[in-house]
Image: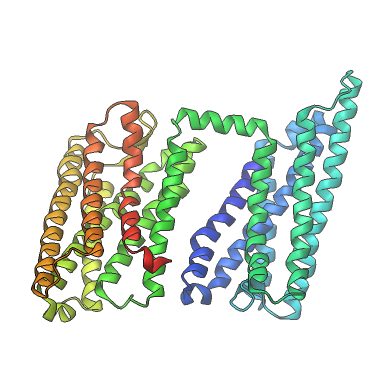
Amino acid sequence: MLTGNQAVSNGLFCVIYLIYVTPMIVFDLTFLKDNSHHAGFLLLLCYDVSIQTHALITVNRFCAVFLPMVYKSLFNSKCTNLIMLLSFLISLIQLTIFFQILPCRIYYNEQELGYYYTDLPICWDYSLYLDMGKLMTICTFNVVVDTITIWKVRRIRSGHGVTKFQKKEIDFLKQSFGQALYLFICIPAYYIIPLFTSSKIVLFMIGMIFWATIHMFDGVLTLYFNMEIRKSLIKKCKTSGNNSVLQMGVSIVGIVCNGLIGFVILRNGSSNHSFSILTGNQAILNGLFSITYLIYVAPLMVFDITFMKDNSEHSGFLLLLFHNAAAHNHVLITINRFCAVFWPLIYKTMCTCKHTLIVIFISFSIAFAQMITLFQILPCRLYYNEEIFGYSYTELPLCQGYLWYVDVGKQMGICVFNLVVDTITIWKVRKIRSAQGVTKIQKKEIDFLKQVHYSNPNYGWKGKAIKFHASAAGNFGRSLDASAVHKIPTVFFLNERQQNVF
């Protein structure tokens, strides 16, 4: 339980870095920078809870070895939960006092390229004594107590005639000393190195990467030196047919690719153009779909979490909402291109930023109302099915009717519509260019046709795969198709516009 609690704290820290800090830096988002102290507060909370849990794990191991008779009653589930709650409340109260009531803040500093405390005496006192001081103390405590624990284990084993060190004991010592050594290096470096250099690269490495890697390195060492955890993880992956691992990889690709589209739009200053707004909205919806898969569906499969499986219909609702809104937006992009070519004189007045945002809102509202009616008011649900390692609809006539006519039917209809209209659009472009004496098809036009004719069938394939795959391989493919359908169009979009990215 304690190890799981630490993993959750470290995982939440890394997720906040992924979904807030990384986009803030990559896309240079002013709004996120202005509110970076809120993310800083959450990061500090996860960080503080994690290092306190580290001390609790050390105490737990010590008691298991030195007090074996009372260990089970001392660290039963109820007592362990109370201890974890108390530890969390200590961190929460301490940070609330300093970073909500008092004027201290930890915020993203553009000049220093990292998170730093407000330049006030009380904040520096916190940094010195309650941050660095506490962490160094806990590191020393963990190393000393873990060494005493392993000494006691060796003494007990020697009494039973076992004189040779076992691999498990050596790995335990390596893990304990490795985690402490990394912290002993990183924490002083975080404070000392910036005093002697003004290099932007060094400041970025120290200010951003060191802090994040502390929580990443903890997990890496725990996995590397704990054979039981690795075996359990491999067993879970095998039972899910390695689907979860691929889902995680595909989701990460989706997040990166859709994030790059947003980066291109913001960097080129084209966010005030109708087509760019629609493309950005598509990237956001596809990115949210990928993030949901990464932070909910993949852990659900990898760690076989019963609570997440029991509530999988909520993530299914979100996945369906993003999927449908993205499909609607795909149609709007097709219509937008068609209007730009066939009605160029009234395009700017017809497709203004205001009108585009209104159309996007209406499109999203239609998808939202449809999902609420079918999957909240009516008894339909999209849930994770353990037998097929994927999401499936409730076995009701109403839900199967939705699957055939509203989901598969609509997807196939959108695919055909997009293919036909985009082909007409490129034909019109060729006709205009031919009238201007340009007879050769340009690479940009060929790439556009490739993007249209590859991405649209991908949506159609997803619809057909949902109903017709019945084998184990088919169920694996169906689940993978559902996530990949929001990445493949993005990959083709980036391939077409790679010059703008790099």
Residue 336 x/y as whole percent: 18, 68
**Can residue 2 be seen at all in this image of the molecule?**
no
- Dividing the picture into quadrants, the one containing residue 93 is bottom right
Q: Quadrant of the C terminus?
A: bottom left
Figure quadrant of residue 460: top left
The reply, left or right, for residue 274 in relation to residue 155 is left
Location of residue 428 in the rendering, given as x and y in whole percent from the top left corner: 10, 66
For the residue pair 173 and 401, the one nearer the viewer reads as 173
x and y percent of residue 283 in the render?
A: 34, 61
Q: Look at 29% across and 65% down and name the residue there.
A: 279
Question: Is residue 126 rendered to the left or right of residue 257?
Answer: right
User: From the viewer's perspective, is 321 left or right of 234?
Assistant: left
Residue 204, relative to residue 138: is it above or below?
below
Residue drawn at point x = 24 percent, y = 48 percent: 459
The mark tally for this picture is 0
- Can you tell which quarter of the image residue 57 is in? top right
Q: Quick one: which residue is furthest to the top in this view?
A: 161
